[in-house]
């Protein structure tokens, strides 16, 4: 069975600081991995996805994530946080690209 | 292009009533997924439908919940005899096809409150 663990339900960073949101997965076969962002009262928007091509994946809004098989991790990073990045972020895994299994989410707060 | 539309955005039902949640996929998309988000939790997969067919309902509760995606019209998630534990945000997503190359586009959700 697949599962996703997001370490830290809340992360707070200062504007301009590095953003690091952690995600570890459990999968018996090489998975497909995703990061989604959810703004208040809105649906989820895809930030980026890993499809076994390049291990470093670049997404929208300056975010990127690195797939590390040895660590079963897919952490999301952004070099410099912006106030508009404040939202909830979800890591998800899928084997066949249809059913998504989500982590519990990490709320990112950006301080001015 | 209109994205995934869900209505109503907010729905209040008393215990024992029925709740009907509607999802209109992106135009041209024939694959629909329903997810439920309980307070303080991530989204949980409920059901995956193609036009007129249920493909995967492994996440649906065995009783009171049903889903359909008719040939014409929106997909409907129906919850009969609602209980307080059904209070959650219900998200619909749609895709053009099946598989990784097809992104799931999410709607804004329906927030169901059972009083």
Image (tube, coloured by chain):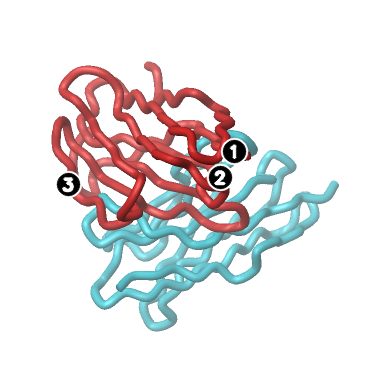
Q: Nearer the viewer, residue B92 or B111?
A: B111
Q: Residue at x 44, y 51 (%)?
A: A58
Q: CA distance from mark 1 to mark 2?
A: 5 Å
The residue identified by callout 3 is B55
Q: Nearer the viewer, residue B33 or A73?
A: B33
Q: Residue at x 23, y 30 (%)?
A: B69
Q: CA distance from mark 3 to mark 1?
A: 28 Å
Q: CA distance from mark 2 to mark 3?
A: 25 Å
Q: Of tags 2 and 3, which is closer to the observer? A: 2
First-in-chain label (2 vs 3): 3
Q: Is residue A37 visible?
A: no
Instruction: Please determine if labels 2 and 3 lie on a single subunit.
Output: yes
Local secondary structure at mark 3 = strand
Question: Where residue B51 appears, x then y in whole percent?
Answer: 16, 31
Quadrant for residue A21, please give it: bottom right
The chain holding disc 2 is B
Q: Residue at x 66, y 54 (%)?
A: A107
Q: Residue at x 71, y 61 (%)?
A: A11
Quadrant for residue B71, please give it: top left
Q: Colour of chain B?
A: red
The residue identified by callout 1 is B113
Local secondary structure at mark 2 = loop
The chain holding disc 1 is B
What chain is colored cyan?
A
Query: Eyeballing the image, is B9 above or below B113?
Result: above
Which disc is residue B87 wearing?
2
Is A108 positioned to the left or the right of B60 in the image?
right
Which disc is residue B51 wearing?
none
Q: Is residue B69 visible?
A: yes
Question: Where residue A93 appears, x then y in whole percent?
Answer: 36, 61
């Amino acid at each position: 069975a697949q599962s996703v663990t997001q370490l830290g339900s809340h992360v707070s960073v200062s504007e301009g600081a590095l953003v690091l949101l952690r995600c570890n997965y459990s999968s018996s076969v090489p998975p497909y991995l995703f990061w989604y962002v959810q703004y208040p009262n809105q649906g989820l928007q895809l930030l980026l996805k890993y499809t076994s091509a390049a291990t470093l994946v670049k997404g929208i809004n300056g975010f990127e994530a690195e797939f590390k098989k040895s660590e079963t991790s897919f952490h999301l990073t952004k070099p410099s946080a912006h106030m508009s990045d404040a939202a909830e972020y979800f890591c998800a895994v899928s084997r066949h690209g249809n059913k998504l299994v989500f982590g519990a989410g990490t709320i990112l707060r950006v301080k001015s | 292009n209109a994205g995934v539309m869900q209505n109503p955005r907010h729905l209040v039902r008393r215990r024992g009533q029925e709740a009907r949640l509607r999802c209109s996929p992106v135009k041209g998309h024939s694959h629909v997924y329903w997810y439920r988000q309980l307070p303080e939790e991530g989204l949980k997969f409920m059901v995956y439908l193609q036009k007129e067919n249920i493909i995967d309902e492994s996440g649906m509760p065995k009783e009171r919940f049903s889903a359909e995606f008719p040939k014409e019209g929106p997909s409907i998630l129906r919850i009969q005899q609602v209980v307080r534990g059904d209070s959650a945000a219900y998200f619909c997503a749609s895709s053009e096809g099946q598989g990784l190359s097809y992104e799931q586009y999410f709607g804004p959700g329906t927030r169901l409150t059972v009083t």
